[in-house]
Image (spheres, rainbow, N blue to C red):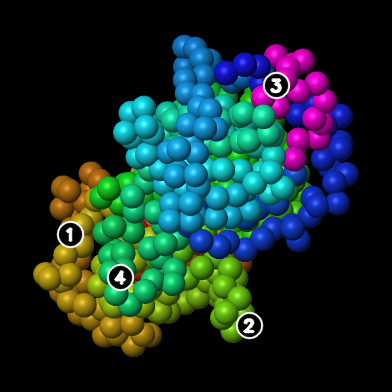
Amino acid sequence: MGCFPCFGSTEKEEEERKDDPRRDGGDFRKEGSANQSTHRVTRASSDKSKSRNGLDSKKEASVPKYGSSAHIAAQTFTFRELAAAAKNFREECLIGEGGFGRVYKGRLESTGQVVAVKQLDRNGLQGNREFLVEVLMLSLLHHPNLVNLIGYCADGDQRLLVYEFMPLGSLEDHLHDVPPDKKPLDWNTRMKIAGGAAKGLEYLHDKANPPVIYRDFKSSNILLDEGFHPKLSDFGLAKLGPVGDKTHVSTRVMGTYGYCAPEYAMTGQLTLKSDVYSFGVVFLELITGRKAIDNTRVAGETNLVAWARPLFKDRRKFPKMADPLLQGRYPVRGLYQALAVAAMCLQEQAATRPLIGDVVTAVSYLASQTYDPNTAQSNRVGPSTPRSREDRKVHSPHKNSPDFRLKDPFKGVNFGAEVGRDLGVGSGRKWDQDELESQGSCEDSPAHFGKARGTPRSLNRDPDRQRAVA
């Protein structure tokens, strides 16, 4: 596919980018429809010495090698081929639109394969550099939870990307502004999507070498295949993570408002834990059904995380945080556990957030605990929902059963203390188990999962590694 410019920024380019007046978070834009990516992206800083297809021909590509070879497997297409596939980019084929351009559904004449064709707007937010990053990343990284890049087109000043077609659209389509005639996602599907998306991040953080920071984890970038199988898409903002003794990479602040980790938005210092924070926002979206930023809501509720923080103070309000579209059809214990995981991912201090591998363990467990609304009593949404212990035990294995002891990743994790101290919730005291028992809510409290304070099983079980990535 010819020569790519250097994958990383030169010092001069970095200085130019830091001086860019669009660096601050005020340039973040709110999301729109499916497959949108409305973050502010600056075009490549230099267009000098371009080859025929518009790519820098003077610099050899500095390509990270994820595997035995750095071979770029993506096919090259002519603009004519892709125009034919998308019926000359007619409106009837349009399936998404954003700051980068438009996405069309098409069919390749050569193979008959149904594809999604992303046509970058030449005056839009995604420039040559981001186009190259996406081609490189998706050509070298392969995982069941990453979208497959089939090929690209770089004819003249045309920039198009060809992906496998995701028939169910994006997670955003199924979570927000759901029409009355459309069935909302049930609890089991939400946990399945969260688990698959977390595995995609885990691959980028722990399996790729060097690690990759996704930097744009949000509901519109999680595409859904048949059976609601999630795949991460849109890698234009992906960045190689820190290696060696480095703790972070410094870069311009880019992303989507509402999803960016606070330390990254304030300092431009990007770490793997920045992605963990973004995962926490999306996980909270899945639990609550609310948008990360919703300007139609009353003051104090427009920002999802800001709305959720006070509610973490009082476990009795946890049922109020569940998506009303669930209509009470969720496991109480699972709701508490899911909220605890989300809260830990959303801690303001990056070092206190869990590693993505531990998040995968926790969310995969939640996804494995299939909830059957036909055999479990429905939960009424509200602060006063009296439930007997016998009712609660229906939703989860008994704590002394072999199944629970072997598989429950929450056993020995003191969620109450961690969430209270690091989220600034209340006085930071432990959600005391005796107190919870006296109120008849022990089985469903995050504090119940952490009886043994000093147990080795913890979502932050490797402090040395944690400090290295934070």
First in sequence: mark 3 or mark 4? 3
Residue sitting nearer the eye, 330 or 215: 215
Position in image of residue 122 (x %, y %): 69, 43
Mark-to-mark CA distance, 3 and 4:
48 Å
Reading the image, the residue beneath label 4 is 182
Q: Residues within 10 Å of mark 2 (few under 14, many from 20)?
A: few
Span of residues in magenta? 43-60
Q: Secondary structure at mark 3?
A: loop
Q: Residue at x 81, y 35 (%)?
A: 45
Q: Which circle, 4 or 1, is nearer the viewer?
A: 4
Local crowd at mark 3 within 10 Å, few (<14), some, or many (≥20)?
A: few
Front residue (pair 296, 327): 296
Mark 3 and mark 2 lie on one chain; the one further toward the N terminus is 3
Q: Which mark is residue 398?
A: 1
Identify which residue is drawn at 37% across, 32% down.
Answer: 109
| Type of amino acid at the residue the image marks with label 1 | His
The residue carrying mark 3 is 52
**Which amino acid lies under the numbered mark 2 shown in the image of this protein?**
Ala
Earlier sequence position, callout 4 versus callout 1: 4
Rendered position, 451 above or below 159: below
Q: Amino acid at mark 3?
A: Arg
Quick check: can you spot residue 355? Answer: no
Residue 48 belongs to the span the image colors magenta: yes
Q: Nearer the viewer, residue 434 or 214?
A: 214
Left or right: 307 as drawn, with respect to 244: left
Q: Dot 4, crowdedness within 10 Å: few (<14), some or many (≥20)?
A: few
Mark carried by residue 299: 2
Tell me the distance, in whole angstroms, between the alpha carbons under discs 1 and 3: 66 Å
